[in-house]
Structures are given as structure tokens and as C-alpha cells.
Amino acid sequence: MTALMRLDDVSVRFPVGRRRSVSAVDGVSLDVVAGQTLGLIGESGSGKSTLARAMLGLVPTATGSVSWMGEDVAAMSRQRRRAFTGEVQMVFQDPHSALDPRRRVRQSVREPLDVLGRGARDERDDLARRALADVGLPAHLHDRYPHQLSGGQKQRVNIARALVTRPRLLVCDESVAALDVALQAEILNLLGDLKDEYDLTVVFISHDLGVVGHISDRVAVMYLGKLVETAMADVLLDTPRHPYTEALLSARPDVNETGAGERIILRGDVPSPLAPPTGCRFHPRCLHATPACATDLPVLVPVEDGGASACLRVAELYGPGPVDTSVMGGAR
Amino acid sequence: MSTTLSKPARKPTRTAPRRSAVIWLSYGILVAVAVVVLLADVLAPHAPNQQDLTSVLLGPSAEHPLGTDDLGRDVLSRLLHGTRVSILAALLAVGIALVVGFPLGILAGYVGGWPDAVLMRLLDTVMAFPALVLAIGITAMLGPDITTAMVAVGVVLTPVVVRLTRAQTMAVAGQTYIEAASSFGARGVRRMILPHVVPNVVQPIVAQVAVLIGFALIAEASLSFLQLGVQPPTASWGTILARSYTFLERAPMSIFVPGAAIALTVFALNIVGEEVQRLLDPRRR
Amino acid sequence: MRIVSAVASRLVWTVPTLLLATLVAFLLQQLIPGDQAVALAGEYATDEKLAAIRADLGLEQPVLTRYLDWIGGVVTGDLGTSYRTGQPVAEIVLDRLPVTLLLTLLALLIAIAIGVPSGVAAAQRPGTWVDRLFTTAATAGIAIPNFWLGMMLIAVFAVQLGWFPGPGGVDFADDPGNALRALVLPSVALGMVGSAEICRQVRSAMIENLGSDYVRTLRATGLSHWSIVWRHALKNSSLPLATILGIQVSHLVGGAVVVEAVFGLSGIGSLVVEATNQRDYIVIQAVVLLAAVIVLVTNLVVDISYRLLDPRIS
Ligand SMILES: Nc1ncnc2c1ncn2[C@@H]1O[C@H](COP(=O)(O)OP(=O)(O)OP(=O)(O)O)[C@@H](O)[C@H]1O
Ligand SMILES: [Mg+2]
């Protein structure tokens, strides 16, 4: 397993007012493994989109580094950076506002080729049309403006634009959240097909555990800017090893219906990221919190089945982890 | 802002014809004004500055449909030529304000940070001066004449354009399609500002241009009335008004036509401006 | 305590703006094309005369020195000396100021007295013919140049009907009663445009308020419609109103210049026109600065009083 992209202790801070800042992402280390689909999950405001932006280099990182196939992205030359830009693309959360309302969708899809100088000038239109055909947009819609398309059609255009440079990594930020359920399934299936066709590695962001569990190989769970658990998808759904993941899982209606366990209701609201709780950030809402949780900072420790959990009481609650830490593999 | 158009008209069917009557009237006025600007020489029965001291202050007649002024000049001909001068002057002022203000507004709105803060501070200061007083001050220093007067009006209009453009640019800069464009490396003037920012900023400004022209027309008339703008004998709406005001007691109604021309034109510009804004409102789509 | 902090926070904004405004007013002089001494004395002036003027005005000194000199005088109330009359500029300006202030104030009252009720009336049923009538009339009102309205008023009420004095020749100290009568037409001419602008702004603020949730709640409590309109909705529209007032003062001071010229009133408006004709640059500069000071100070006062009256703003 090789890491296509490696995040090492990445933090992103935004200035808020004078001399204050919010840590939207705080010390996240994560590997994106080639060929796998990585699901990224967390409540609203947990920093998922910000992490995605950091992956693409759209926000400056306050600490840590992002490396692409072993090369630090921040240290790349202009030329390497351009190549990197073409290889990592993103599909944004809201299909409606992600397309320039004053450009025909074919122009929008063609634009990355123009900006990155890919292909011959007269071939770019063909490439754009091919990408639009690949995502299943009928040819007679290629010259429409975004407002003349439906939400699902717009999201197809967004995907086509992300794929036109033939990227290796596709980051989908809640790319189906704005669509209705039937369309969600349709777009998810499309993404599945395209993954094979384009030989993609996908990072799929969502706050819907059902969607993420369905299409991911591995899942990373975020809470208030920190990574709290990573695990293979089936393992995570079956035996979560962090109280927050447990709570998320039990909040799913289907789990509750089967009566598979007592429903854990998350108490209170997500604390403000401006003033995150001390110690474990989840402790004010955690069922298993001890006084130590309010003071000691948990770190990700390897657990069984190749996962990792950032809970101080992980051994106590979920059994001991693997003796040999070198097997943690991709789940850093 | 969210104020004027936030509530849809409650009885659209009943009010629709009423609204459109005023709008069509306004379009008609603007077309007529445009025709006069283009064809003033053809339409005018006499030369605008041709004096005839044997026929001063005549009433309307076939020869002089609007009569003559105190120097025996044909009032209609002066009005037609004056329309051209006034409109072109107003366009010059608004053109200056747009050429200077639009790029500055884009810069301030897109770059933000200290350039924005410094610029806004300066503009706040300029806007603290009553527009007409500052325009008079500038004109007085530069020496009264129509070009300097319209440069002055352009200067006082510039902050308005900057503010409008800046607000619109800030709204556009926060849109996802801008971030999407930067995600595949689009940046700078050629790849970001021109293709994505400008086209999305320009439309709402266009609607405001009509209103700005209206302001510039009134400013031209005011400055010319004060003899700081268009200089006699050249006819403009302001100079005609100033002249006829001096013989108000002998021919009281001679002030009516030029003033009505200004008022109707500005009215039509404001109505059309509002209408364009309404048509461009994305919520209508 | 709240008063102090409210005043302080606004002063922090106003004082630098005032300083910048003095700079702008001063820099106007730099626009004078060519040699200012020649502009003042005429092309045929002797070299000695030009040299004397230059020494007198300190034209040889760098701009910054001259600005600091001037601004030093300004803060102590010394605006310099008129080149034409030899009088202190402050004296000339103060002599003319009352007429302009009175005219502006009367016009503002007229604008509010007409603008607020008609804005409220138009907001009652947005989209109906009553509303259309008011909004179209307001658009027309904005389109009418105030000095033309003044001429028309003179033509009808002074020349034809003789109800009010015609333009010119009113001495305020001599005959205050007649002088006030002479201010009626100019105030109306100046106030009409303002009333149209106020009408539009009040209308939109009211429409927004009348459609809001809290008004719906008030209606549910059984409060009468008009009591909601006057006591609650209008009060909640008063922030935009305060903003409008600030803008109006600026518009009115600007409009006063032309209206004074029409009516032959000797305020600072006609002063700046006279000064322009005589190329009395230092007077022009003083009047331009004074206009900005009037606007900034009114804004400051409106803002502070608003903060004190409304607990929600801080
Ligand atoms: N540009 C910004 N400036 C300031 N704060 C920001 C900015 N972008 C994000 N934040 C803050 O960072 C935190 C994380 O935001 P982010 O958008 O990454 O969350 P998210 O997990 O994607 O949420 P959602 O599910 O709602 O999309 C939030 O508290 C947010 O307010
Ligand atoms: Mg997000």
C-alpha cells in the first residue's frame, strides 16, 4: 500500500477578528492510499471542507505538511505545482454555485485545460465534450448555461470539470448532499463507475455515515478539527473504537430499527471551535468521560484491524490494541 | 439591497399594465433623447447661436416653434443642441467615474486587506464632501469650463462606483465557482478577474449607470447654471436655464421647457435603471 | 459610561476623516493650472507684484509646510485672509453661514414632514396603485433639479401671484419676519427632492418591517394596525432613517449652493460662486472644507444620539 497523498500534522487556522484565530483543522495526520476510497466524516463545522482545501493547497497550512507521492507540495516548483493541480481535483459541495453562471457548461469544463495548458487548443473542446459524455450529460445540453440545467445535471458537469484533466485523486466534498435521495444514488453510482474507468483514488466527504460506509474502503472520523478514529469501513461500522463514532453510528435510523444496541444520544451542541474544550475535545459530550479526559490530550493510537483511535480509554472500553505497532499500515 | 424588492407585489396582475405604461414611456423618452443627440443638426430648424436682434423674446410661431430668446436665437434649436451637449457631458462624467472606479472597486473587493482599508478610508473622506460642493471646488480651481466641470463630477461619482463594484465583487469572490476556478490553478487578471469576476460584477453596475447618468445630468445643469460648466454661447440645458432665468419676468414660461427636459430624462433614466435591475435580479430566473 | 464610549468610538472614526478632509480641501489648490500668483494677479502683472504675492501666500515653500501652516491656523479658527477683500476668511464665512444653515434646516424639516408620512402610506399595500402613485411621484421628485423647481416656484408664487418676495435683497438682521418669508420658497425647492428620497427609503424599510415576524406577533396580540405602524414598525425603521438623515444633510448642503444662487440668498453657496468668479481660492477652499465639516459633524451627532437612544446598537 503506497500513500498517494500524505498529510503530516496538518493544521489550518483562520483569523477571526483581531489577534484571534480558529483552528479549523488541528494536527491531522492521514494517508490517502492509491486506489482506495477514503471516507471523511464528521458533524457540520468539524473541518472536513477545510481539510479538503488543505489537500488541494487552497488554504495555507499553519503547521505540518502535505506531500504528493513523497514530494512536499509546499516546496514544489511552479511547474511541479501545475502538474499537481491537474492531478488533484475537487467536486464541490453545492452544484449550483460551483459553476460560473455566465459561462456555458462546455466552457466551464474546458477551462481547466486552458488554465493548465493541457492538450492542443483545438482539441480541448473535444476533450471537454468527451468528459461531459463520460458523466452522462447528453450532447444537446453541452452548450447550456448552468441555470438551464437541473441540480443532478449540474453536478455531472462539476464532476466532468474535475475529471477533464485526468486527475489521480478526486476529492468529493459532500458532492451529493444538495441533491434529493434518488439523485444521490445516481451520482454515487456514477462516481463508482468513473472510479474504475478513470483509475481514480477518491476522498469522499460527508456527514452521512450511511453514504460514506457504502462507498468507502476506509473511513476517517473528524471532530472539531481533530481526527478521532480511522478504520476500514466495514470494521468501523461493525466495531467502532471511539465513543464519538459510536454515538454517530447509533444515531443512524437503520441501526436503531434493528435494535442492534441502545441508542446513544449526543448531548449538547458542538462546542465553538473558537474555544475548544481542553483535553479530549469530545469529553463534554462523552458518555465515558473521566476527569482525566478534561486535562489529557489523546493521540491516535493503533487498534486492532489496522485502525487507530484517539481515546484515552480506548483499551479499557474496546479491548487492548495490537502489540506490534508496526502493523498500523495505512492507518496512521 | 434586500429592501426595495424583497416583497413581491401582492397583486401583480392588476399592477402589471400600470407599471409597464410608465416603463414604456421612459423607454420612449430615452429613445427620443438618443435621436436628438445623434441628429441635433438635422432636426434643428436654425443654427443654435444665430442671433437676430430684430426678433427677440418672440412667442411660439411656425418659424420658431418654441419662440426666441433675448438675443433672438431660436429656443428649439438651442434646446436640441443643448440636449446633445448635456448628454455627452454627463456621459463623459460617468465614463470617467467608471474607468477609474470599476477597476479600483474590483481591486478593493477582491484583494481586500490593507489596500482595501486605505482606499475605503480615502473614499469615505471624499464622500464626506457634499458632491456638488466638491465638484464646484474642483471646477473653480481648474478653471470653469465644461470639460473640467465634468471631470469634477466624474471625481465625485467615482467613490459611488467603487463602493458598488466593491460590494458586488466581495459577493462574487465568496462564490464557490471562484474557489472552483482556483482549485484548477486559475489566478491573476487574465485567468480569474477577467473571465470570472468581471462578468459577474458588471451587470448590477450597468443598472446603476442609468442612475449615475441622471445625477451627472443634474450636476451639469447645476454647474452650468452657476456658469461653472458649459460656457455661453454654447447651449446646454444648464446654460439655457440660466439665460432664460434672467428674463423670467418678461417670459416666465421660457424656463419651463429646458427644466422639463432635464426632469423627464432623469426620470426615465431612473425608471429604466430600476427596471434593468429588476430584470437582472437572479431570483426572477 | 455608555455615553463616553459611544462618543469615543465615533470620534475615533470622525477625527481622522476630518483631518483627511482638510488635506483634500487644501490639495484642491494644487489643481490650479500654472502659476497661482499669475492666476491671482492676472497675466499682465509686474514681476515685483508676482513676487510679492508669492511671498505673501508662501508659495515658495513646500506644499507640506504650507499645509501645516494652514491647518495650524484652521484649528485656531484662522482660515487665512481673502486675497480680494483683505478680510479674514473666517469672518466672511461666518457672516454667510446662518442663511445656509437656516435654509438647510428648514428644507430638512420639509423633507421629513412630507417624506416620512408618504413613505409610510406607500408601504401599507406594496404593489397597489397607491404605492405605485407614491413611488412614481418619488422617482419624479428625485428627477426634478431643485434649482429649476425654485425658478418655477418664483415664476408662479412670486412673479405671478406675488405671495412671496422675489429673489434677492433680503437682510436677515434688518427684517427677520420678511426674511423668513423669503426662505419659504427656497426651502420648499430644496426640501422636495429630499422628501422624495426619504419617501423611498422609509417605504422599503417599512415594507421589510411590516412583513417581519415580530410584527406578525404584535398583530396576534390584537394591537391595532396603526399603533403597530407608528409605534413599532416606524421606530424599528429609524436606523435607516438616521442614516438617511446623514446623507440628506450632505445632499441639502450641496443643493443649497444652487438654490441660494437662484433666490439671491447670501449664504455660503453664493459665496463660493462669487469667490470662484473672483478666483479667491482661499475662500473656496474654506467653504469646501466647511461643507464637509457640517456633514461630518451632523453625522457624528445623529450617530451618537442614535446609539444613546437605541440600546440594541453598541
Ligand atoms: N474562511 C474561513 N474563515 C473563518 N473560519 C472558517 C473559514 N472556513 C471555515 N471556517 C471555520 O472552520 C470550521 C470548519 O469549517 P469547515 O467548512 O471545514 O467544516 P465542515 O466540516 O466542512 O462543515 P460542513 O459539514 O458544514 O460543510 C468552522 O468552524 C468554520 O466556521
Ligand atoms: Mg463542508
Image (cartoon, coloured by chain):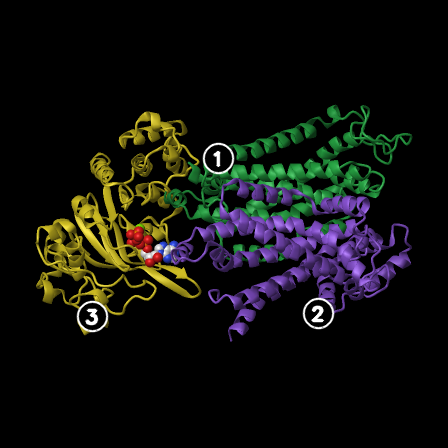
Chain colours: A yellow, B green, C purple
Mark 2 element type: helix
Share a chain, discs 1 and 2?
A: no
Up/down of C242 relative to A100, above or below: below
Residue receiving disc 3 = A293
Mark 2 → mark 3, Cα distance in angstroms: 63 Å
C247 displayed left or right of A178: right
Residue receiving disc 1 = B14
Pointer 3 residue Cβ closer than 8 Å to ligand 1: no
What amino acid is found at the position of numbered circle 1 in the picture? Answer: Arg
Mark 3 → mark 1, Cα distance in angstroms: 67 Å
- Using a 10 Å C-alpha cutoff, classify the residue at mark 3 as few (fewer than 14 neighbours), some (14 to 19) or many (20 or more): many
Q: Chain of mark 2?
A: C
- Visible residue check, residue B137: no
**Quick check: marks 2 and 3 in contact, CB under 8 Å?**
no
Q: Residue at x 42, y 53 (%)?
A: C212
Question: Where residue A212 sits in the image (x, y, percent)?
Answer: 20, 47
A248 displayed left or right of C189: left
Q: In which quarter of the view is residue B255 placed? A: top right
Q: Residue at x 82, y 64 (%)?
A: C173
Pointer 1 residue Cβ closer than 8 Å to ligand 1: no
A164 displayed left or right of C269: left
**Which mark lies nearer to you, 1 or 2?**
1
What amino acid is found at the position of numbered circle 2 in the picture? Answer: Val
- Looking at the image, which is closer to me, B55 or A292? B55
- Visible residue check, residue A315: yes
- Looking at the image, which is closer to me, A209 or A225? A209
The single residue placed furthest to the bottom in the displayed view is C1
